[in-house]
Image: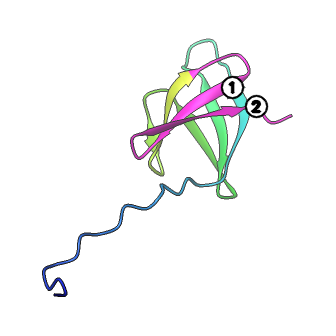
Amino acid sequence: RPFSGPLKPQMGALLWPTIEYYGFIKSNNNPEIYLIKADNNFIRIKKGETKNDISIYKVFKDSIVLSFQKNERTFHIKK
């Protein structure tokens, strides 16, 4: 007998924007500003900020860990 109840939505894979990490700008009196390109748009973001659902989780010398919709992913600096 066919099921006639409401359908549950399918859980698909999270689609991250295309991300490139370009490094950071350091200033004596201000927090570092990190340069990220997300879907061909440059974003200047500080640790603790969220822009376009993207936030900085951790920072390393050669890479950055970003959070997007509660999922983390590591990106290495683009040379």
Task: Return the x and y of residue 30 as percentages of the image width and height.
Answer: 55, 19
Q: In which quarter of the image is the N terminus?
A: bottom left
Graded by Cα atoms within 10 Å as few (under 14), some (14 to 19) or many (20 or more), the crowding at tag 1 reads some
Q: Are the two marked residues, 1 and 2, in contact with CB atoms closer than 8 angstroms?
A: yes
Q: Is residue 36 magenta?
A: no
State whether residue 10 is above or below residue 65. Answer: below
Name the residue at 39% across, 41% down: 70
Q: SS at mark 2?
A: loop
Number of numbered discs: 2
State whether residue 35 is above or below residue 25. Answer: below
Name the residue at 24% across, 70% down: 8
Task: Return the x and y of residue 50 as percentages of the image width and height.
Answer: 43, 40
> What secondary structure is the magenta-colored segment mainly?
strand
Residue at the outermost right position: 79
Which disc, if any, is residue 77? 2
Q: What is the distance, in whole Å, between disc 1 and disc 2 at their CAs? A: 5 Å
State whether residue 36 is above or below residue 1. Answer: above
Quarter residue 5 falls in: bottom left
- Residue 35 vs residue 71: left or right? right
Amino acid type for the residue under numbered disc 1: Ser
Amino acid type for the residue under numbered disc 2: Ile
Graded by Cα atoms within 10 Å as few (under 14), some (14 to 19) or many (20 or more), the crowding at tag 2 reads some
Q: Is residue 70 magenta?
A: yes
Which disc, if any, is residue 63? 1
Magenta region: 59-79
Query: Quick one: label 1 or label 2, which is nearer the N terminus?
Result: 1
